[in-house]
Image (cartoon, rainbow, N blue to C red):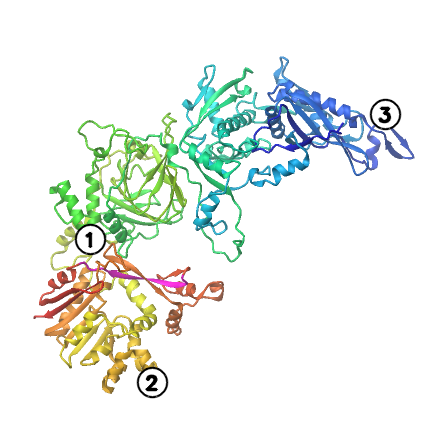
Amino acid sequence: MGGDSTYFKTVLPHEPLPGQQFGFVHLQGAFVPKKKEMKGAQSLHRPLCPEEKVVDNEEQTTSCKCTEIDYIQTTLTSKLSSLIQLCGMSPCDLLSVQPIIQETNKGDNNVGKVRLQLSTPAAARRLCCRIRRGNYGPRDLLASTIITDDGNDESAAGITVQNEGVCPFGCKGRYVGKAVMVTEITPSIDVQQQHQEYYDDEPFRWERAAPPKFRRLLTNSNSQKFKLTEDEVADRRGKTRFVYLDNVLGKELTLNDITLDGQTMDASMKNDLMSVFQGESLEGKASISGVIKNGLLQQDARIEDDLRHAFQEALRDNLSQYDSSKDSLGVELFVKADSAAGKKSKPDNIKPKQDPKDTVATRLLFDHLHIGMRSNDDATNVIQSLQGKRLQLKMELPNALLQNSVATNITVTTGKLYLDYADVLQPKKGNLRNKKNEVKTRKEPSKSECTSSTDHVHIAGLHVIPNYVSVQEEQMLMAGLTGPHAPWAPPQLTTTGGHIKRRVQHYGYVFDYESSDVLRRDDGGSNDIFGKGSDKSACPALPCMDANVAEMTDDEVEKWTERAVEDVKVWEALAGVIEKTRRFDVSSVLSEGDLNDGVSTMSLDEGTKQTYPHLNQLTINEYNPGEGIGSHVDTVTAFDDGLLIITLNGGIVMEFRKAIDDGDDSNMRKLVYLPPRSLAVLSRDARYKYEHMIVSRMTDTVNGEIIPRKLRVSLTLRTALTAPVFDKGIGKISLAQSKVPQSHLPKYESKVFPPRWGQLSDAALANASSKNGDEEDSPVDRSDLITPETESKHVHAVYDAIATQWHHTRGKRGVLWPGATQFIESLPPGSIIADVGCGDGKYFAEILKHSYVIGTDISEPLLKTAATRGDDADDGKRKNIDGPQYQRLSKAKRALSENPSVAVADCLHIPLRSNSCDAAISIAVMHHLSTEARRIRCLAELKRIVKVGGRFNVQAWALEQETDSKRKFHGTDLLVPFNAQPKYLQTQAKSSENDDNSQQPSSAESKGKGVAQMMAEQYDGAEFDSKKNLVVFQRYCHMYRKGELESLCQRVPGLEVLESAYEKGNWVITCRVCE
């Protein structure tokens, strides 16, 4: 025995069944009892084997019968035949058992391998799974009693190990209990040809039993280890032979997708099949799913294994037509591995999670897999031919499931297939990183499931209306809602004690994530504007239209909104969009079949409109790429029916899962794509019966197209309800349990913009004014002289930080605006000119040619650069420092330029006497004032300090930029970045070394950081640009529309606009003081 020279190769799990007539299985283990030497008195109590004899107190043993090849072969044949029958297979499947003799190091022979021949390769594969799952070892196969269920007493069937596996012939040996290694093999050609065919030609075969780790061929900037450029992705797509296949069989599988050929299939059998295809276990069928070993049931998942093998072969049959390999090698299938394979089944050790279907034991096996074709051309052919199609998989039904030993075929229809190129995941050379010094980045995004996989699911009350807002509305709303005036909410706690990570805005009423309820405020106009002493509910009022909305038609509201967009009035436009949404009739845009997105059609009476006129609460969420939100149903007692979601800038896939068990399993889950500028309406079932969520990932797959996520801003409009009233002792809250019917909360609106926290509604403000009287100030009146946080943080602090660089890159170059220089030259010689917002004094030289100057600015560091010109260098080098204009000044005027008259002052409160100046200029100042009232106050101050008949010149950035300009603005109030070089910030930071409040980073904190990153951390509001190694500051700027400066001047009594002009992206006005 064992002299067979036939070469066998392993049949790997992902390979097709061999094309041979017979199947072969290789068992490896210790089939000869292991003998342990006994020491001391223990050896006296063991009876001697008849074949042993004692010579000079030393045991010498002749060969025991348990080591004979014939005995091993006969016993294994008998026991394996019985075991095969217990495992639900036919004993006739086993044709022969061939022990293989191996010579040990001691020179004796040992049987460590056994080759089994079976009737078919399919039977060999089934036996491998049975032995592997049952953990059968030599002790179970050679030292046990196996009783089949042929007799009447089925309870006695099973395997019982005798005498703890001791040799039945009385030698010292004992069979081991360790499970044998089982492998499916097949006869092959000689070793040389085998090596040449399969190993030299590596692209045609995956050589390892363990499947590779696959990845979709996408560019992903967040994965440094596996990062691919677009060119690399294109190159791999043209070379790879692997294909990703999704939506095959899974949770979307229905009973109608399974049919039985030849006989009627009852519902219970279909449910069992669906359970297996969805990755669940049939543990309840103990009589047909396991073998009793030593009194304990060993689950061997025979039905699951047989169905998986049948599924693989059926899928291979469908894919074989795309295999163009020369020798018809077949298709490799890499099915998602079952966590219980090769291990003992221990259902008691699997602790259920929140959803029992999400446990390790029930994860899907057939929903997605990978295919290994034999060439890239075959892979391309498969993708192009099967994209979006369904396959009919015909497979043999396991006898164990039928329980009548009648083989029957079933046909299973797959879902709409989604295919894409895949490749083996391997780190790029040179991209290995030092994890100790690596900055943590977001993990690799999760797999993106295609929306087409749930096209057949319809949810009542779910509607998606594309292009609901225009492109212009989207651009302007994005600029305003993410701009400097955006009233972002303070950090909010969640029910678990954490904080909401994404940025959120609330209007009208606050939704409190900690209590999952609306904070209902007191709108009575009392001094306690926050309600009950808490400021958590003091969110901005809902923007409303400055018109009699009730008398306006829908067309008039639409035109009013369009005018607000044309005038770039962000908050007015938002108010128009809100009112338009209140009036929007959802039923007017729905047709039969509804939008091709699988959303449901309406079931309303003819002539009935579906509108939401009572919308009174708005929540704005900002989602960065990769961010999502957990599955939830908006609190039933907080909001009425109807959630309306407007998506801006970036589309997203929203997932709906049924939250209420209504007995219908056909519509359990749906994926819906919300494109940019769309409106999603969630009412009825979509509002109350389904949870909705956004999975955290970097891409979405929509109808086969992979769409990278972008920054998304969502506007969620809802109708907040009054607080419910419940009887004591009621646990779970529902609408039906409220003693008093809930009603809609009043609309908390205001026409005062920009909105801010602590803002009263117009109704509350009027009420407060009537209570306080005309002589008393309103509790929310604010002086225009108080600098808003927007200006102090994004104007004053920024220019203090960048003063040195500003002077080096602006002032020293001597670049002046032509309109300002023309105005200065037009003034009479000897004039006293006030330069309000003079900065580093770059206009001083031009003014000092013929006149005198007094400069003011809010930034002391900028004024220091203007006041220390004489200290910068000697006369020989001053030309390079102060520019050529200073070389034309007289000695007296140069002395004035070196020690100018400057003062730190706000442009709204200039420290000069009234009528003390002949003229004034204010260059690039007005666009840093954040409110209209402060802009008017600045113009009034300029008028106050200039004599009657005098003039002043004002210049500010324009919203309307030239076509060739690099600056493009989509809103009037923006944060404009300024890139600061670290060397200038270091100079600026050193000036505050003696400041006791200055904080210098410790050596531990600064370890591994560059200068730019450390400086960015020192300045509040600054960001670090790792690509350019710069510190980025955000400057607040208001972009003036055409005619806006003139309109402001008209609101200041005693001013006359002499000239208005447009100059290289700026608006310029010249005014005369009349009185």
Image quadrant in which the C terminus is located: bottom left
Span colored in magenta: 1028-1041
Q: Is residue 1030 magenta?
A: yes
Image quadrant in which the N terminus is located: top right
Residue 140 place in picture, x, y as percent: 68, 26
Q: Nearer the viewer, residue 196 or 754?
A: 196
Q: Quick one: label 3 or label 2, which is nearer the N terminus?
A: 3
Q: Which residue was labeled with disc 1?
A: 569
Q: Which residue was labeled with disc 2?
A: 876
Judged from the image, the secondary structure of the residue bearing numbered disc 2 is loop
Residue at (32%, 78%) from the top-left corner?
Answer: 881
Q: Which residue was labeled with disc 3?
A: 50
Foreground label between 3 and 1: 1
Name which residue type carries label 1: Lys
Residue at the limit of the structure toward the left, as seen here:
1075
Q: Can residue 530 be seen in this view?
A: no
Local packing at callout 3 (Cα closer than 10 Å; few below 14, some 14-19, many 20+) is: few
Foreground label between 1 and 2: 2
Seen in the picture, residue 472 relative to 91 is either above or below; the reply is below
Foreground label between 3 and 2: 2
Question: Which of the 4 quarters of the picture holds residue 677?
Answer: top left
Residue at the limit of the structure toward the top, as seen here:
152
Q: Label 3 to label 2, Cα distance in Å?
A: 120 Å
Local packing at callout 1 (Cα closer than 10 Å; few below 14, some 14-19, many 20+) is: some
